[in-house]
Image (cartoon, rainbow, N blue to C red):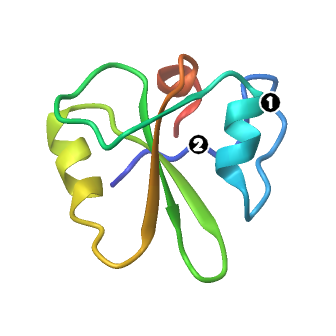
Amino acid sequence: MGKYINEDSKGLGLPARNKTAHLIEDGALKIDTPLVWIEGLVCVVENAPFDAAGYAYDEDEMAEFKRIGDRKTTWMIYEHAKNIAK
């Protein structure tokens, strides 16, 4: 899990919590847990103190996010993910 999204497509920093809502406002589309990898795949993981928005840039990265376990995850397609993830 090595590339994260900490700002939106306009360069505005994402809040520590509610990253899902902010990304949806910026054009992301919420989806069910994916069965196959597609470009633009993002997983938001809700940790106790903060949310982490990770770019699942390939099948292996997608599989890592699927192994999160007990934390809530939200999957989405975000067309800007590849360009802004670091």
Could you say whether the residue bearing mark 2 is in a helix, strand or loop?
loop
Task: Write down the quadrant of residue 56 in the picture.
Answer: top left
The residue sitting at 58% across, 42% down in the picture is: 5
Q: Which residue is mark 1?
A: 11
Locate residue 35 relative to residue 78 in the image: left or right: left
- Quarter the N terminus occupies: bottom left
Locate residue 81 relative to residue 9 in the image: left or right: left
Residue in the foreground of this view, choosing between 49 and 2: 49
Q: Residues within 10 Å of mark 2 (few under 14, many from 20)?
A: many
Q: Position of residue 74 (x, y in %)?
A: 48, 51
Q: Which residue is mark 2?
A: 5
Q: Earlier in the sequence, mark 2 or mark 1?
A: 2
Locate residue 58 relative to residue 78 in the image: left or right: left
Amino acid on which disc 2 is placed: Ile
The mark tally for this picture is: 2
Compared to 62, does 16 lie above or below? below
